[in-house]
Amino acid sequence: MSVDGWFEPVEELAAHEIDLSDLGFWQLPHALREGAFRTLRRERPVCEFPIPEWLLADEAQQGSYYAVMRYDDVLSASRDPETFTSGRGAVSIIDLPEEFLEFFGSLINTDDPRHAHLRRVVLRAFTPRRIERLDAEIGVVAQRLVREAKEQGTFDFVRAIAAPLPLRIIGEIMGISPDDDQFVLERSQRILGALDPEFVAPEMSPDESILTAALELTEFMGDLARTNHDPDTVMSALLDADVDGTHLSPSELASFFILLLVAGNETTRNALSVGMVALSAFAIERRALIADMSTSKLNSAADEVVRLASPVVWMRRTVARPTELSGIPLATGDRVLLMYSSANRDESVFADPYRFRLDREGTRHLGFGGYGPHHCLGAHLARAEIVAVLREVLTSMPDHELLGEPEMLVSNFISGVKRLPMCT
């Protein structure tokens, strides 16, 4: 099946008809949402919307937020953490209770000096030797998964390759048994798929589903920390880490685990899936990559995959002092969403922004969250996983075909692919 036009935007909505707070908007076809983002970049680059009704638990949360659509504005805010802060929550439009901030995001929901401290603790755990070992394991797992998928002939790429690869690498990082991968995957999907009926139990509200999944993962993490005895895992390094005389607390460790599931599992899984769509939609680039699978070409392809996928649609910041973006004044306390999925298509920055191009140079994409203090800690591992899958798929099944368009997750936060039928 051809997906040639899947990435192309369709501008059917006028600027005044676009409402990012309407859940129905996030259920629109991919092309219509891309068209809406392009319209907003052109006509309303910093646009105000009311807090979505489906997020309001009480009247105290009423108000509005600003969606920042252009690359330069998103990059500027990312590099100015003193003005655009994260301490009131980076992954929620509304202000969350402190316990929620601990559960969902850990260091991404903090500002300096605590953010810098937590980041140093985590970085100390990822030594060059551990990264080298993980890179080798990524290659082994990717090769096995692609071989097993090829043997099936027809398969769901998400289920067969994109989901198990990053999940197994997280398992290696934290010392999780492969037998527990499905348990972890299901809780991760419930946290990020809370707006999609497929992942919420009928007897639960979205908030209840998220919190229950987080509590189950926290309990699982506590058991793992007590029983883990492998000194070569990052889990052990995190338990033993000492920066400025401080260790991670049990709640900080559990919170980092949940963050790792979001940043290292869900995002890479969806980038890999969109990468398969890109290879099918852009045959010339696919043939060029098959002809030259050098490290530099594969790395370029991986970055293009992340740019096109933009797995995290946005992150929130809170304005700490009066400022402006694109001439729009912002007051202290204003909520701001940095729209990475729009910024990575900015026509003023990227030539042919809706094309998969191996020769793209210069401007760096914002798929890893900009280039300020909150730049993704796992960017290296994500690239390594994408490179490994591209290499194995194009080597073992260069003539693979998609059997349908990607089935997308209903979410305003994650650009997720639930299923992607494929054959060799």
Image (spheres, helix red, strand yellow):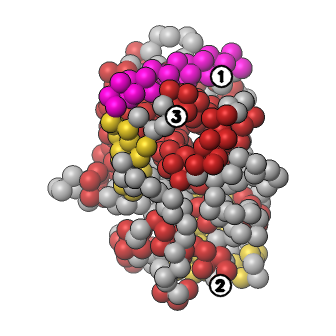
Residue at horizontal 44%, vertical 15%? Answer: 228
Check whether the beta carbons of the residues at disc 3 and disc 2 lie within 8 A of each other.
Answer: no
- The kind of secondary structure element at disc 2 is helix
- Of callouts 1 and 3, which one flags the residue occurring earlier in the amino acid sequence? 1
Q: Is residue 247 visible?
A: yes
Q: Residue furthest left?
A: 203
- Give the residue number, with chain letter if any, for mark 3: 398
- The kind of secondary structure element at disc 3 is loop
Q: Position of residue 302 (x, y in %)?
A: 64, 41
Q: Position of residue 316 (x, y in %)?
A: 58, 62
Residue at horizontal 49%, vertical 83%? Answer: 13
Q: Amino acid at mark 1?
A: Ile
Q: Is residue 356 left or right of residue 275?
A: right
Badge 3 local density, few (<14 within 10 Å), some, or many (20+)?
some
Chief secondary structure of the magenta span? Answer: helix
Where on the picture, by quarter, is residue 324?
bottom right
Identify the mark at residue 131; answer none if there is no mark. 1
Residue at horizontal 55%, vertical 24%? Answer: 138
Badge 1 local density, few (<14 within 10 Å), some, or many (20+)?
some
- Give the residue number, with chain letter if any, for mark 2: 43
Where on the picture, by quarter, is residue 7?
bottom right
- Of callouts 1 and 2, which one flags the residue occurring earlier in the amino acid sequence? 2
Magenta region, residue range: 128-153
Question: Is residue 146 inside the magenta stretch?
Answer: yes
Q: Is residue 110 visible?
A: no
Q: Amino acid at mark 2?
A: Glu
- Of callouts 3 and 2, which one flags the residue occurring earlier in the amino acid sequence? 2
- The kind of secondary structure element at disc 1 is helix
Q: In whole angstroms, how far apart are the C-alphas of marks 1 and 2?
A: 44 Å
Identify the mark at residue 174; answer none if there is no mark. none
Q: In whole angstroms, how far apart are the C-alphas of marks 1 and 3?
A: 29 Å
Q: Position of residue 41 (x, y in %)?
A: 65, 76
